[in-house]
Image (tube, grey):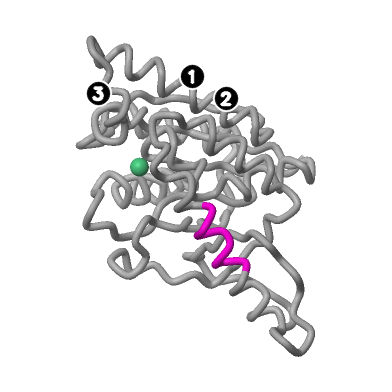
Amino acid sequence: MSTALVISAHSADFVWRCGGAIALHAEKGIDVTIVCLSYGERGESAKLWKNAGATLEGVKAARRKEAEAAAAALGAADIQFFDCGDYPLELDRDAKFRLVDVIRKVQPDFMLSHSMEDPYNTDHPYATRIALECRMIAQAWGHNPGEKVLGAPQLYLFEPHQTEQCAWKPDTILDITPVWKKKKAAIECMEGQQHLWDYYTNVAENRANQFRRNSGGQAGGREAKYAEGFQSIFPRTVDAL
Ligand SMILES: [Zn+2]
């Protein structure tokens, strides 16, 4: 059984940025685990805070419910909430080791997280640094000797909100047309961020245009209506180009 692991700073990021990848691989029989390091309760829940009588616990509970519904719509195998707090997101040593435990248990064939930079949202690159740090610890033979050590899963960086400011440059475009309905259903679970629904539909349509162009364009390019872009960190090991 193949597996994948998504590390999301806030509880909705995985939906906009790699919901299609989650649904597509789930349909291929790959167990996808999602870790939400926080609920995005303080920084990404403005609409919920506008409700009279909103409380931190209430907002967290609503965000958890939305994220669980979205994960189910995408067919994810598991979703875990670390509740580390947001704006700022911070993980202590114990929380890092908890994430290492998840990585070693899942033994992902590939991982997904945020861009390496994001001046608008420092929680996002922080999550990526944590993903890389915990991937490294999971590979260390001296960490909890006797456990199964991690191999070398690729880390794909999913698309940030404003790519140019985040120094994010995709090298992989994934056709998510077959699962677009699932991604759309997951997007519509995020009722607190309705202002993003159309935006991320447009992003998927534009990436699909680039999928067509990069798969051959007018000279035999493959049709695609919706796509997601990713930037990979590590080199691929191949026997032929
Ligand atoms: Zn976020």
Residue 188 picture location, percent across and down: 54, 34
Locate the C terminus and report the quarter of the image it occupies. bottom right
Counting residues from the start of the chain, the first of labels 1 and 3 encountered is 3
Q: Residue furthest bottom?
A: 219
Which class describes the residues within 10 Å of circle 3: few (<14), some (14-19), or many (20+)? few
State left or right for residue 25 relative to residue 112.
right
Checking the image for residue 65, the label placed there is: 1
- Closer to us: 107 or 22: 22
Q: Inspect the image, locate mark 1, and give the three-letter code of the amino acid beneath it.
A: Lys
Residue 52's spot in the image, x, y percent?
23, 13
The label on residue 69 is 2
Q: Which portion, as a residue range, is magenta? A: 201-208
Query: Vertically, is 111 above or below 222?
Result: above
Q: Secondary structure at mark 1?
A: helix
Tag of residue 50: 3
Q: Look at the picture and state if 4 lies above or below 231.
A: above
Q: Main secondary structure of the magenta part?
A: helix
Q: CA distance from mark 2 to mark 1?
A: 6 Å
**What whole-number distance in Å separates the C-alpha atoms at marks 1 and 3?**
18 Å
